[in-house]
Image: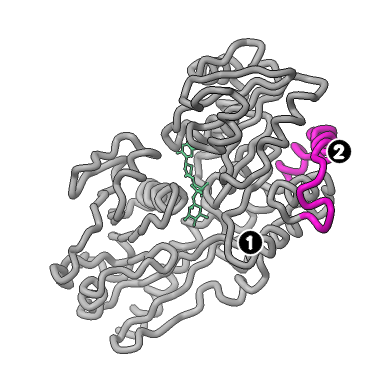
Amino acid sequence: MSANKNSATSLAIFCKVVDNYGDIGICWRLARQLHRENEISVTLWVDDLHSFHRICPEVDVGAEEQQIAGVTARHWRDQDGVFTAGDIADVVIEFFGCDIPPGYIAAMAQCNPRPVWLNLEGLSAEEWVEGCHTLPSSHPRLPLTKYFFFPGFTSKTGGLLHEASLDVERQRFQSDQSAVAAFLAGFGMTTAEMMSLKVSLFCYGHAPVAAMFDQWQRGDSPVTCLVPEGVAAQAVQAFLGVDAKAGTVGRKGMLTVRVLPFVAQPDYDKLLWACDINFVRGEDSFVRAQWAGKAFIWHIYPQDENLHHVKLRAFLGRYAMHQESVRALSLYWNGAAAGADAWGDVSGLWQRFKDDLPEIANWTAEWQGRMLEHGDLASNLMKFVRSLQSVTAENNV
Ligand code: TRH
């Protein structure tokens, strides 16, 4: 336990990788930002180092403990029972209710003062989130309280992950045409492809990719679709006629499809910055697309009973209120459009969306400004932590 009990000097994040890359993607960004911008010693406990390695190639998948970008990364296995109060961080964050080890919780109860304990929840634009953000929940047996912390799109939520230097870095890259060209050339892109409408494609397997490819292929201007290896594999393979391995490229009509390797997280950001339109998914790429300043279409993570359609509509209600073309294409892409339009003809939807691109770009900049008025997630989280710590300190006087 740290000597300075009234301010957070050490913080632990527990991340269980449920599937894909969003869980570790979010926790890794948060860990780096908290360390870099708050001078906190951060430990990231991750149960799946292979997924971590894919977004951060520096990760040694065999290491129990390692330092990366100033963060201590620890392989979370079965360490329960080995913790004492001395091992416990001042602030403990469990991501998405991931059930941190009971032994760690027991040791938290031994600390004086107790650590601040937060459950960082998933992102949703639904209204109920505001009512649940920062709510306390008492442990049934131990003298501990856990607080729910919700990311979100309004000032009554925790906001969105956004590093202090992000906009400067993005604008520097986007205004340097030779840097953008060099970055895209690194994937083997030709000059003609760079001059075409560049679309990055990251979605789940059930997105109507084949129909979209068909539309782009028959369109009146060239489109280059950049798709990471393994994404929409069936549709990509059907288009290419060969295995969709990184480096493979195929052309039909107006469409070029180029398969990219899965890149490190900072390069994925650059890909979003370099493209004209980004198809993104899940949570983390969805948020990064909002900061890229380009038009984007979100493929939401599917849930039982189409609960995700409710979440999609809640987001579109905030983001695309005045943009029918964004709304209509998004609903189509997610199979959430009403009646016959559900999986209907994409041609009109795409054309309207494309025609609106300049307007969408303006709106995206305005949206960024609005979102940043709420402050960023890491800063809001630390403000909340400090408010809880000062109450504890006052009670101890
Ligand atoms: O991968 P995702 O679908 O992740 C998640 C998980 O499924 C999770 O369980 C669920 O809760 C959440 O979605 C909603 O999509 P996401 O969130 O966009 O995460 C992808 C991460 O991978 C993101 O940090 C960007 C990163 N990435 C790279 O680093 N390189 C790449 O080439 C690509 C395509 C992505």
Query: Relative to 114, is 319 above or below?
Result: above
255 vs 301, left or right, is: right
Q: Which element carries disc 2, helix, strand or loop?
A: helix
Circle 2: residue type: Gly
The quarter of the picture where the N terminus appears is bottom left
Q: Position of residue 346 (x, y in %)?
A: 80, 39
- In the image, which residues are magenta? 337-366
Circle 1: residue type: His
Q: Is mark 1 within 8 Å of ligand 1?
A: no
Tell me, yes or no, whether the highlighted magenta stretch contains residue 344. Answer: yes
Q: Quadrant of residue 214?
A: top right
Mark positioned earlier in the residue sequence (1 or 2): 1
* CA distance for labels 1 and 2: 25 Å
185 vs 212, left or right, is: left
The residue identified by callout 1 is: 308
Within 10 Å of the Cα at label 2, are there few (<14), some (14-19), or many (20+) other Cα atoms? few
Within 10 Å of the Cα at label 1, are there few (<14), some (14-19), or many (20+) other Cα atoms? some
Q: Residue at horizontal 57%, vertical 23%?
A: 241
Camera-nearest residue between 182 and 235: 235
Q: Residue at horizontal 64%, vertical 36%?
A: 278
Camera-nearest residue between 54 and 69: 54
Q: Residue at horizontal 66%, vertical 67%?
A: 126
Q: Position of residue 233 (x, y in %)?
A: 53, 35
The quarter of the picture where the C terminus appears is bottom left
Q: Position of residue 68 (x, y in %)?
A: 28, 41
The residue identified by callout 2 is: 348
17 vs 76, left or right, is: right
Query: Relative to 167, is 10 above or below?
Result: below
Query: Relative to 308, is 355 above or below?
Result: above
Residue reaching furthest to the bottom: 141
